Amino acid sequence: QVQLVESGGGLVQPGGSLRLSCAASGSIFSISALAWYRQAPGKQRELVARITSGGSTNYADSVKGRFTISRDNAKNTVYLQMSSLKPEDTAVYYCNLDYLLYKYWGQGTQVTVSS
């Protein structure tokens, strides 16, 4: 069983930065793809960024050049560095671990971008 625990959310002004972290339990972290999703009120959950076990990354067009996903297999942790934040980035951000047919989710962390 895998458990994912996100941290690092909060309130930030437009143009500011935040770094989200997601710590995972279990032994499959290093061989799994990891991703960050977000869900704003009244909207569907959407993929923000993904990183494969080999380190390849992809991003939603809306965050390219502003967000960076990274992973530390020694710490079983995936990060999302967010810069130049905009009000439209406001959402609950969820960590996801994808291994074979299994998908695991964290509980989510709120990010609010507002002046």
Image: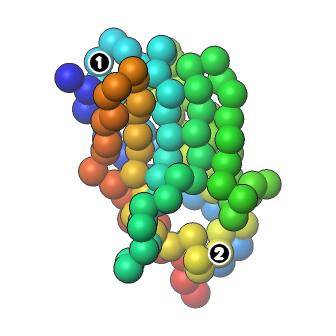
Q: Which residue is mark 2?
A: 86
Q: Where, by quadrant of the figure, is residue 44 drawn?
A: bottom left
Amino acid at the residue labelled 2: Lys
**Looking at this view, is 56 or 83 the one in front?**
56
Residue lying at 50% horizontally and 40% vertically, measured from the top left: 35
**Looking at this view, is 45 or 27 the one in front?**
45
Amino acid at the residue labelled 1: Gly
- Find the residue positioned furthest to the bottom: 115
Residue 1 makes an appearance in the image: yes
Q: Left or right: where does residue 9 sit relative to residue 2?
A: right
**Looking at this view, is 57 or 44 the one in front?**
44
Q: Where, by quadrant of the figure, is residue 84 drawn?
A: bottom right
Q: Left or right: where does residue 94 sit relative to residue 18?
A: left
Q: Element under label 1?
A: loop
Above or below residue 50? Residue 93 is below
Q: Which residue is mark 1?
A: 26
Q: Element under label 2?
A: loop
Distance from label 1 to label 2 (Cα)? 34 Å
